[in-house]
Amino acid sequence: MIKNRLKLGCALLVLLAGPAAAETPKRDELKAAVAASHDKTVKALQDWIKLPTIAAEGLNVDKGADYMRQLALDAGFQKAKVVASGGVPGVFATLDAGAPVTLGVYFMYDVKQFDPAEWTSPPLEAKLVDRPGEGLVMMGRGVVNQKGPEMAFLAALKAFKATGRKLPVNLVLVAEGEEEIASPNFPTVVADPEVTAALKKTAGVFIPTASQTNAGTAGITLGAKGSVEFQLIVGGETSDKYPKADIHSSNHARIESPAWRLVKALDTLVADDGHTPAIDGWFENVKPLTARQKELITIGVKSRAEADVKKELGIGRWIDNEDFQTSSERFLSQPTVNIQGLVSGYTGPGGKTVLPGRAEAKLEFRLVPDMTRAEAETKLKAHLAKRGFDDVKVNVSGGYGPNQTDENTAFIQAQKRTLDKAGIPYTLTPRNAGSWPGVVFNGKPLNLPAGQFGVGRGGGAHAPDEWFLIKSSNPKVAGLDDATMLYVDLLYEIAATGGKK
């Protein structure tokens, strides 16, 4: 267990009066089992990293689902099956411990694309390397987002098996292989009658994560922004006024350019400042932060050094030179219209004097309460149509709305007590500025509390040199084994809720 390093009166520790923390019986036995299996857990994580499922590329789609199913069975789930989704399949598994309380767990088994040339260590070798100021880390695609934290949770279940005891809760696991393309078919997996029936019995659903800062402060998130991924396409496939392939650039005197047309369309989506969404009616259903949410953001701001955050992001200033508090409120409260990439014409060395036959922009929206995916898609198309961009094709490839859970639910209180018992300072975050499909659980018909939970550290998600902490050199931060034991403790805390949500 990470020892208590800060006084309970510390401003960083967010407390809520409630039931006393549940005891983890014979915890030392479980801890010894986790330590004894450390090398096996590391090896299992390395093996998983070596099999990337990349939905955008159709890579290892079936193999990834089968592998996820086997991981669940190996961890003690009695039943596990692959569920067809219309796209990349999901995985559904149940563990019946004969307990009165059931916990839902969400996994993603897919990862983002990668370019090995950008990495200092091969992204699929999952090598263990020393990271100054952190300790021994594993480097590999998907290791922190989310295979490392998920493997820590599976290791917790294996510790129960190794000590011959039953879990204090039953488990329902749902996993998908399309999270990195905004979960276009995950609602289909959850809508499977057997899956829905099992989830309705749960006290809530969480996704394992690595939430600690380098100062040791953990985070409990009460929600997440929604996400919509789409492409805007202009070219010979969308109108006969554009060439069907690249042609000599001299023809631009008499033939319209798809690239310029796309640029003009994109320019209407944001204001002249380059970041404020300008889509008609975009802010109509945006719910402002409450006073309590602003208070939580203030506590979070005080828990981190602004200079460290800027250094991690590689920037020197925030939008409009805002202070840390204001930029943090913007970070969690504002919907965004982001260009992920632009593709058109020739991009090699030198010039090629062509008029491109096609131009494509890859974009995403981040949505906040009370926006919806359907609303965002409808407003985008209406906005472009109103301005005469009927030749701009809109291809929505995935997405879902935002999610939110009340901090006073028994589900969140159990997470707080777990951290309190471990002596780990933490902050509550109104929502994650990133996204996961928690709305599938929060929304109808399930109406479940949902969130992210876990300790440990990592970085580089969606970027080169992604890493996850295995053995920490910082006594304030959890390594793999400590992160695993926190999930053990969480299970007992969830059991203590009696199934209340």
Image (spheres, rainbow, N blue to C red):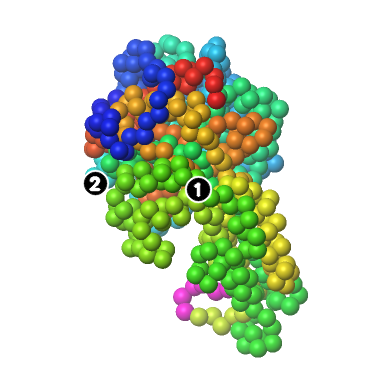
Q: Using a 10 Å C-alpha cutoff, classify the residue at mark 2 as few (fewer than 14 neighbours), some (14 to 19) or many (20 or more).
A: few
Q: Amino acid at mark 1?
A: Leu
Which corner quadrant of the image does residue 492 belong to? Answer: top left
Q: Which residues are magenta?
A: 345-350
Please report the residue visible at 50 percent of the width from the left and 80 percent of the height from the top: 351
Q: Using a 10 Å C-alpha cutoff, classify the residue at mark 1 as few (fewer than 14 neighbours), some (14 to 19) or many (20 or more).
A: some
Q: Which of 413/128 is in front?
A: 413
Name the disc covering residue 289, or none. Answer: 1
- Which secondary structure type mostly characterizes the magenta part of the structure? loop
Q: CA distance from mark 1 to mark 2?
A: 38 Å
- Pointer 2 residue: 132
Left or right: 323 with respect to 252? left
Where residue 137 appears, as percent x and y from the top left, is 31, 41
Q: Is residue 405 magenta?
A: no
Where residue 494 appears, as percent x and y from the top left, is 47, 21
Which corner quadrant of the image does residue 66 belong to? Answer: top right
